Image: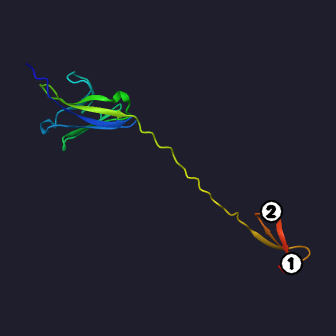
Amino acid sequence: MPVLGSVKSAEVFYGFEGGNVKIDCTYQHEYNENGKYLCRTRWIPNNALISSGEPETKGRFSLYDNRSTRVFTVTITELTQKDAGTYYCGIDIKRNVDEYTEVEVTVNKAPKTPPTTTRATRSSTTPSTTTVKGNTDNGQTRDCTSSSPTGWCLRESKGPA
């Protein structure tokens, strides 16, 4: 009777709609050189969503194999509710049935961003005033300010300039 391969227990990975999820798939050192992949249905050839040896990115999926830590990571971007469910991290075993680790992906609704709160601050500004002293025809001086509504002199004062 042929062995169908082994399936390790499921790990759960969480993400938010519109966000990303990183799925870490560990493997034994003897599989360092083997191909790695992620699929939704196990034991069906050529069913991988992404595989090592392909371009590192395929649509919304990317795969990075860190052989020193024996973990390959698949990232799914722009998550939707359709991405939720069971996936299988697969190891391509030549001349034998592949090994799988079952993982669950949970996609939560995107958190509602809290309303932006702006604090109204009262700012009191004093209009700038420019005082100009000048002589009138009759020898009096006037103080004139640029803050007056009409720009005219506000008052008269007696005395030399």
Q: Earlier in the sequence, mark 1 or mark 2?
A: 2
- Rendered view: 68 above or below 62: below
Q: Are marks 1 and 2 in contact (CB under 8 Å)?
A: no
- The answer to whether one can see residue 133 in this image is yes
Q: Disc 2 on helix, strand or loop? A: loop
User: Can you tell which quarter of the image residue 52 is in?
Assistant: top left
Q: Nearer the viewer, residue 154 or 139?
A: 154
Amino acid type, callout 2:
Gly
- Rendered view: 96 above or below 156: above
**Residue at the right extreme, as displayed:** 138
Residue 15 is situated, as x and y percent measured from the top left of the image, at 34, 37
**Figure colour scheme:** rainbow
**Residue at the top extreme, as displayed:** 1
Residue matched to label 1 = 158
Residue 59 is situated, as x and y percent measured from the top left of the image, at 35, 31
Residue 132 is situated, as x and y percent measured from the top left of the image, at 78, 71
In the rendered structure, find residue 151 and report the number of the disc placed on it: 2
